[in-house]
Image (cartoon, rainbow, N blue to C red):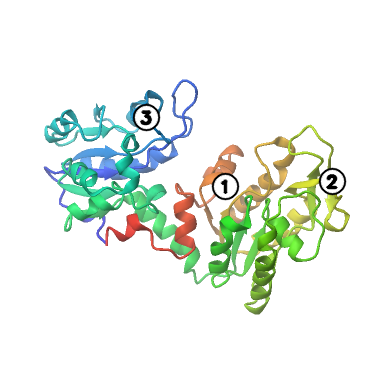
Amino acid sequence: MQYINEAAIAGKRVLVRVDFNVPLNADFEVTDDRRIREAIPTIQHILDNGGSAVLMSHLGRPKDGPEDKFSLHHAIPTLKQFISAEVKFADDCISDDAFAMSAALKPGEVLLLNNLRFYKEEKKGDEDFAAKLAKHGDIYANDAFGTAHRAHASTTIVAKHFPDTKYCGFLLKKEIENAEKVLNSTDRPVCAIMGGAKVSDKLLLVENLLEKVDYILIGGGMAYTFLRAKGYRIGTSLLENDLIATAADILKKAVAKNVKILTPVDSVVSSEFGEGGTIKVVRNEEMPDDMMGLDIGPKTFEYYFDAIMDSKIILWNGPMGVFEMDSFSKGTQAIAEAVAKATEKGAFSLIGGGDSAAAVKKFGLEPQVSYVSTGGGALLEYLEGKALPGIAALG
């Protein structure tokens, strides 16, 4: 794989797949600029080395063609905060006007194309659509890790049109390197903190990590399937009944591989999903039949804290509870603070995008961890050992 710093950029148009799929508020203002910020090193490198940049991305999930609320022009004010170059905007990604604008670009200029997903051909990986996108550049660079697990036209198929001039951007390179630190580290112990709602979402990841880690700490809704596999009553907590046997098998494999899988010893439970019910902390043995677990309890955190502080490499993917609700956020916040403390002590910590990234941001701890991934599903699949189409296309 070639990297963008190896490309002869001077006088060339570089077609860059960025990930500007950012959240917007009711006034269409960007509320989290991290994905845009992380793309700046690649864009700036192109401009500094005499090239021009044609940026393409998707935003949201438009269903029926162009809609203003999904227009990428909403990202321009934020992009302009980070680069001094003028940012031109094409109201379509494959119109004659868009091709005229990219053809006329001068070194040091930036053109942002409108939302790729205004065309259904993008997600279908359509060859003709990819060929049209390729007209915008002399060189192709993929810097969108968040969509690298999708074989879409702009992430994978377009690379065929640049057999010798396709490159990995700086963000994509950084994402791969940080994931590899977890997967192939010689530093021990390695700790994986796994949360979120369902075992089914993390099954392949947990299986793959059994070969790589020393500790797996389980939280979130998925913990109750593991607790049921251990024979505990779980009340009305989330349960994937068809995966109880699978969870039990994972626990057995972990013992055989000398991997310590830690599950909650207590939970914050509620009589209803929400903050309006009766809420209390109970140990596993005391779980009421009519209540559900919505966060790990304080004894569980103490138990998990020691494993986190013992570790040299930490991966965190998924919250410990329904952290969006204050009553059930304490476990996730405590874990985030522990990961930050371990990082300060010298551990490497990778936060796995999605809800985990939202949690460290919510609790103001983003600067205190080693790396926060811009990809949720993409990082998950990479850590599961899958080849990501967007990365494979650059090889």
SS type, badge 3: helix
Element type where label 2 sits in the image: loop
Identity of the amino acid at label 3? Ala
| Marking on residue 85 | none
- Provide the residue designation for mark 1: 356
Work out whether mark 1 precedes mark 3 in sequence or the reverse, and give the earlier one: 3
In the displayed structure, does residue 134 sit left or right of residue 68? left
Give the side of residue 376 with respect to residue 140, left or right: right
The first of marks 1 and 2 along the sequence is 2
Q: Nearer the viewer, residue 56 or 245?
A: 245
Q: Viewed as shown, does residue 171 lie left or right of 318?
A: left
Q: CA distance from mark 3 to mark 2?
A: 47 Å
Marks 3, 2: nearer the viewer: 2
Q: How far apart are labels 1 and 2 at the CA level?
A: 29 Å
- Tell me where residue 340 appears, x and y as whole percent: 60, 50
Q: Secondary structure at mark 1?
A: helix
User: Is tag 3's residue or tag 2's residue first in the polypeptide sequence?
Assistant: 3
Q: How many marks?
A: 3
For mark 3, what is the residue?
75
Residue type, mark 1 in image: Ser
Does residue 153 appear anywhere in the picture?
A: yes
Where is mark 2, residue-wise?
290
Q: Is residue 346 visible?
A: no
The quarter in which the N terminus is drawn is bottom left
